[in-house]
Image (cartoon, rainbow, N blue to C red):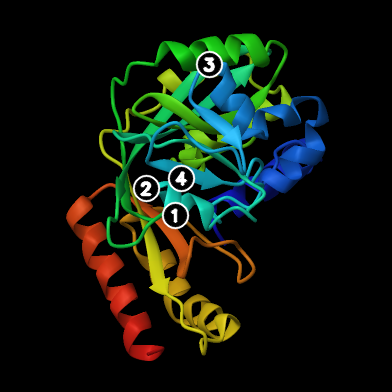
Amino acid sequence: MTIKSELREEIREKYNLNIDDYCPKNDEDAWLMYPKLNYVYNKMFICEFQNLSYAPMPILPDKYPVIIKPIINLMGMGINSIKVNNDEEFKKQYNNNHFWCEFLQGDHNSWDFVITKGKIQYICCFNGYIDNNKFGTFKYWSLLKNVKLPKILNKFINKNFKNFTGCINIETIDNKMIECHLRMGDIDQLPKDNLRIILLNYLGKIENVKAEIEKLQIIDDLYLFPIWQTIQSYHNLKNIYDYLKKVWENELIKDDNIIMYYFDEVKHAYPNKFKRWFLFSIKNFDQGIIIKNRIQNDIINKFL
């Protein structure tokens, strides 16, 4: 049983409530749970809010490179995103009914906000280290400490979430927003005591989230490691998923170094041909690299 499952049962026993009725597990849940806020999933709205260059297809950009991607993506993982470098490449995408926006370079951060009635109570930010050999993927994520909140994020939250209680996740590149999610991002990889407070905020059971979190032990280091596999046409995804659950989940549970983990379902979206099977969090970077390499090498050897 994962820590999230344990907390789900704990809340059910104590409050006779199902946290899943209040806390969306993914963007599909969030879309249905917060219909009045669905507009924040529109990436053209995100661009417009901060004056980034963008347009729907097939309007030509003024300069390159640009990124073509879905206007709304509830499946995540940068699915169907394409980098385009010139007019010739762009014209090959004329039948693409997405949109383009200017190509951003710089630190790629994932920001999680715990909000109570429109007020930011807690901020958690991870920096992503891109794998340049696999477009759309990350080698790992590292928790940032004493991070300064970009003004555009504070403005965006104050304008659009005045009465909101729950969590939102915003991804940025070079402190410019690229997408917003009405659910937790990587904050669900925090230790159990932190996650309990965050979940109880959804239920209105915590009077002062900020004060309660400040009572907890400071998290000095935390790393998130995704497990990837290059998918070939002959691969049976269900067989691979079943193998990983059977062989590696017990290893993750028994390893005291691992704080949290979760598996992506077989049907979960993945960028290009690179499938992320699961993600785990750990405090020691070197141990995380060793575990990541062991699992990914095992997948390669088992499923050529």
Left or right: 79 in relation to 144: right
Question: x, y percentage for residue 59?
Answer: 59, 38
Q: Quadrant where the N terminus lies?
A: bottom right
Question: Please, is residue 86 above or below residue 121 in the view?
Answer: below
Q: Secondary structure at mark 1?
A: helix
The disc labelled 4 sits on which kind of residue? Gln
Q: Quadrant of residue 47?
A: top right
Q: Which residue is mark 4?
A: 189
The disc labelled 1 sits on which kind of residue? Glu
* Disc number lying in front (2 or 3): 2
Q: Is there a contact, CB below 8 Å, between mark 1 and mark 4?
A: no
The span from disc 1 to disc 3 (Cα, nearest Å) is 45 Å
Q: Secondary structure at mark 4?
A: helix
The span from disc 2 to disc 1 (Cα, nearest Å) is 7 Å
Question: x, y percentage for residue 224?
Answer: 36, 50
* Disc number lying in front (1 or 4): 1
The disc labelled 2 sits on which kind of residue? Asn
Ranked by sequence position, the earlier of labels 2 and 4 is 2
Q: Which residue is mark 1?
A: 89
Residue 78 seen in render: no
- Residue drawn at 55 percent across, 63 percent down: 264
* Residue nearer the viewer, 221 or 177: 177
Q: Which mark is residue 286?
A: none
Q: Which mark is residue 85?
A: 2
Q: Quadrant where the C terminus lies?
A: bottom left
Question: x, y percentage for residue 186?
Answer: 47, 42
Q: Is there a contact, CB below 8 Å, between mark 2 and mark 1?
A: yes
Question: Please, is residue 78 above or below residue 112 in the view?
Answer: below
Left or right: 219 in relation to 44: left
The disc labelled 3 sits on which kind of residue? Gln
